[in-house]
Amino acid sequence: MKQIAILFLFTIFVLNCGHDLSQYDRFVEPQISEKQPQKMLVYEIMGDPNETAGVAIGALYSAFYKMKKEYQMEMAAPKARWPQPPDTPREEWIGIFGLEIPESLSNLPKEISDKYPQLKIETWEYGLVAEIMHVGSYATEHSTVQKLIDFISESGYQIVGGHEEEYLKGPGMFFKGNPEKYKTIIRFPVREK
């Protein structure tokens, strides 16, 4: 468990270093866009995200680094889907964590599936989505989520599924960094009313 948590922190540290996040600046204001399906390496886990996220993301990145060369995989920001209503008690939350993988990867190598039987490959469908970037700690996302929900309604759309988060910038390897500078894309699937 400790090794997985260290790997998780290392991964977030690597993601924070040297990556140009300016391509995401357009998400400072909410918007509706079309998003293509993505093949994902997925780990589903139940529990308080403060206790379970490290396990899931650690397993994803451990598998990623073992397959990186063979499958020409590039580093991507981890994502998580939260299918349950927000009033669900945190210890009952289901987090579906994922990393984008190449289309050419259809089966996990046996050594990885043996070590992490919870890992699976699936395609995350998208279509129309409403997105916004939250800048700040994860604990302060509520107002940004509400801003996105209001935008969706005011723009003539409705939410048709649980929300997704894409963790662009978060805690570092040795320090939690400045939570006020964390960057998270918040995304809902939508359709016109």
Image (spheres, helix red, strand yellow):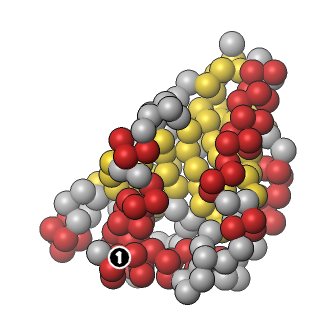
Would residue 112 appear left or right of 140 to someone viewing this image? left
Q: Nearer the viewer, residue 149 or 60?
A: 149
Q: Is residue 106 left or right of residue 78?
A: left
Instruction: Indicate the quadrant where residue 17 lies.
Output: bottom right
Up/down of 72 relative to 89, above or below: below
**Quarter placement of the N terminus:** bottom left
Q: Would residue 31 be seen by someone viewing this image from the given angle?
A: yes
Rendered location of residue 166, percent (x, y)? 59, 55
Q: Is residue 104 visible?
A: no
User: What residue is at 41 percent from the left and 67 percent from the top?
Assistant: 54
Q: Is residue 119 above or below residue 33?
A: below
Q: Which residue is mark 1?
A: 4
Residue 32 x/y as whole percent: 75, 35
Residue drawn at (77%, 36%) of the image: 147
Task: Check disc 1 and report its element: helix, strand or loop.
Answer: helix
- Residue most extreme to the bottom: 174
Q: Amino acid at mark 1?
A: Ile
In percent of width and height, residue 120 lies at: 29, 54
Write down the quadrant of residue 93 in the picture. Answer: top left
State the residue at coordinates (41%, 52%).
48
Query: Farthest residue toward the top?
Result: 193
Q: Quadrant of residue 89?
A: top left
Up the image or down, 133 lies above or below 36; here it is below
* Neighbours of disc 1 within 10 Å: few (<14), some (14-19), many (20+): some
Residue at image coords 69%, 51%:
140
Tag count: 1
Q: Which quarter of the figure is the C terminus placed in?
A: top right
